[in-house]
Amino acid sequence: MRQDLVAGLLGALLVLPQGIAFATLAGLPPQYGLYTAIVPCIVAALFGSSRHVVSGPTNANSLALFAMLSPLAAPFTPSYIELALVVTVLVGVMQALIGGLRLGTLANFISPAALLGFTSGAAVLIAVHALKDLLGFGAEAGSSAPAVLQHVVTHLGQAQPAALLVGGVTLAAALAVRHLRRGWPYLLVGLAAGTLCAALLAGRDGAAAVRTLGALPSALPAFHVPEVDWQAVPELVGLAFALTIVALGQSISIAKAVAARSGQRIDANREFIGQGLSNIVGGFFSCYVSCGSLNRSVPNLEAGARTPLAAVFSALWLLGLVALSAGALARIPFAAIAGLLLLVAWTLFDLPRWRRLARLNRTEFGIAAATLAATVAIRLEIAILLGTILSLVSYLYRTSRPAMRTMGFDTMAPERPFVVVDDTPQALPECPQVKLLRMEGSVYFGAVQHVADRLHELRAAPDAPRHLLVMAKSMNFIDLAGDELWQAELMARRAQGGDLYFHRPRPQVMQMWQRTGFLELLGRDHVFPDKRTAIATVFGKLDPRICAACRARVFWECKDAPYTPAPSDAAVPPKDGSSGDPAPAGLDRPQGA
């Protein structure tokens, strides 16, 4: 409880400037940002699944709401405010429906690489937006990341040394406490140190004073039923759907990012229901669209929060702070908050994981890098969608080329296992009449062409084995296209005088073959539960004339088959130095095997 109280206090202090700034970005009066940091925060914490995600106003939601509603009404006007509240309720209804219909599993398609790129991109955005306050520029630096960077570069000479000093003191104090006193609320200590530094500078030289929060509006939300022309509702539904995608994309990505750091399991459907209820209730208490906030959730986790009560305490602290300590809170400098956000951004970037990903998997590294670039350059929900699409494309490419390995033996021992011939230098010769092939992967529409080409290569050569025994234990799944592929292979093998057999296919594959009729076409006696039965049955269908001249003799059944040396074999000296015909490979197997 104590840790949740401390984490909640930090969250309340962090959201004070953010709520005011984000409400302004959304075209709403400043107090609406504070309202959105209270009511939705409590509801989402109580009904969501994450222990650490803190909901409230965000930069992306604010900008998206402004972009969608400004063509319909003038920002900051009563009609604009009513539209924002109605849209918020509609967004909440859609979010709750998505969770109630169990569609939250769609969030499982956000890959870890895309999530890493998203969180790292968000860290870059947090750091970039913190720069304008760290250098003392304020709102004139712009609201987008490119505008802020351009302003910082072109006006670097006009940076305020006092603001930079306050941000530096905040950052140094927080780092020192985190390193020397583990378990202490280092972010809160850093904020106090920065505020004290700003007060000392202001008392020593008024010209050196840094920009502070200033007077705060009332944070007590009042119940209000939104009023809107019903004829505008159909158009607002479309806007609400777009905002739903924005909010849910952020919320689930942030919840999964925080869960990856805390080790908690996230129920996406419950998270969507929690977010939906928070917006439905919030829309009736003068709140605009809210979702999980990354730059509040990560500090909440770092501050030691243990339960969702930390978010509830954050909202209650905000109410109390604004009501009782408005004068003291007004002196918190923006530069101190910027210093804390820089520390949060650095922690969030997770450079060691980037190095590990670059070393182990270049494809995943490229997906993460592309998602990072998209997060910085375009809207957050588009970046998440791009990363997810890239991950799915990468997965489809990998699964479209399943491995097909030639199997054999490297010993004549009684319990000999199959081995991959290409990976085993001491492998015994292959049987010239039976190809042993292991399928590794699903045979679905995307993989059919690759598998068909490989099967054609195996039977196209003049001396290719006519019989094919497929080790199907690793063939996880087939669809209709895969079923048609095996039918075509069966027809081709039988047209050449051979046949097709399967060893240990999975139950779901057998069920598919039974539904399509392929199992009857193939014959149930062509499917085997173990390799001994498979080889013994297939051996009985081989051409005895070829067996008679075969020197491979890798099957135990070959011992009893007649052996007639070819004329060329007679001229070959015996391997053991004795007179007589050279012994075929399979005739020296242990007795009784």
Image (cartoon, helix red, strand yellow):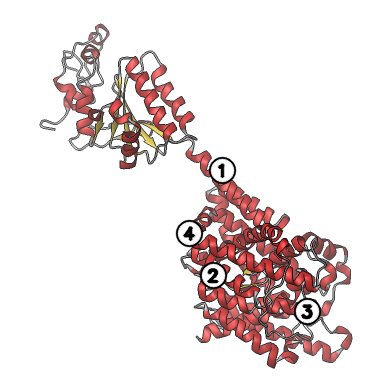
- Contact between marks 1 and 3 (CB within 8 A): the answer is no
- Residues under labels 2 and 4: Cα distance? 13 Å
Mark 1 against mark 4, which lies toward the viewer?
4
- Contact between marks 3 and 2 (CB within 8 A): the answer is no
Is 410 or 113 nearer to us in this picture? 113
Is 282 or 305 nearer to us in this picture? 282
Mark 2 against mark 1, which lies toward the viewer?
2
Q: Quadrant of residue 165?
A: bottom right
Circle number at residue 165: 3
Which residue was labeled with disc 1? 393
Circle number at residue 102: 4
* Label 2: which secondary element: helix
Q: Is residue 200 left or right of residue 439?
A: right
Image coordinates of residue 284 in percent, x first then y, are 65, 76
Is 210 or 455 nearer to us in this picture? 455
Circle number at residue 274: 2
Measuring 38% from the left and 28% from the top, which residue is drawn there?
486
